[in-house]
Amino acid sequence: MRTLQKPCYSNNTYTLYAIIRSAASEIMIFFRCDSKALEDSLCKRVIVTRDETITKWLDPESAAVSRDALAKVVYSRLFDW
């Protein structure tokens, strides 16, 4: 498995990743999951090919879309009966 390095973005990007990291530890209590797995699912994309598995860091916009999609699913499951 190959992991690509975290891209070099501005301080705002690292702020987004830091917010996701700190929130993941609190959210994992409600989801009963590993905080590292939650953080990876929001900040990384896994590409599986025939020969290898590649893990790629998401850009800030894509990470925000992942975060918003998770929030939408949680809201839907809580309030849509």
Image (cartoon, rainbow, N blue to C red):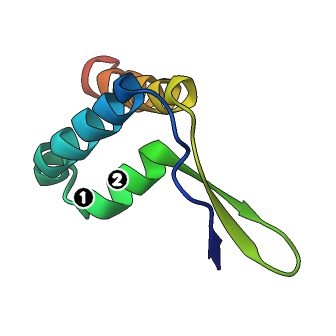
Separation (CA) of disc 1 from disc 2: 5 Å
**Residue at the right extreme?**
50
Q: Is residue 81 above or below residue 37?
A: above
Determine the residue positioned at 88% across, 77% down. Answer: 50
Mark 1 and 2 residues: CB-CB less than 8 Å, in contact? yes
Horizontally, is 66 left or right of 38 in the view? right
Q: Which residue type carries mark 2?
A: Leu
| 25 vs 76, nearest the viewer | 25
The quarter in which the N terminus is drawn is: bottom right
Determine the residue positioned at 57% across, 33% down. Answer: 59
User: How many residues crowd mark 1 within 10 Å: few (<14), some (14–19), many (20+)?
Assistant: some
Determine the residue positioned at 40% across, 22% down. Answer: 72
Horizontally, is 51 left or right of 71 in the view? right
User: What residue is pinned by disc 2?
Assistant: 38
Q: Which residue type carries mark 1?
A: Ser
Name which quarter of the figure residue 14 lies in.
Answer: top left
Q: Is residue 52 above or below residue 27?
A: below
- Which secondary structure, mark 2? helix
Determine the residue positioned at 14% across, 47% down. Answer: 30
Q: What percent of the width, then of the height, locates residue 44?
A: 53, 50
User: What residue is pinned by disc 1?
Assistant: 35
Q: Could you tell me if residue 23 is visible in this image?
A: yes
- Which secondary structure, mark 1? helix
Q: Could you tell me if residue 77 is visible in this image?
A: no
Q: What percent of the width, then of the height, locates residue 28?
A: 18, 52
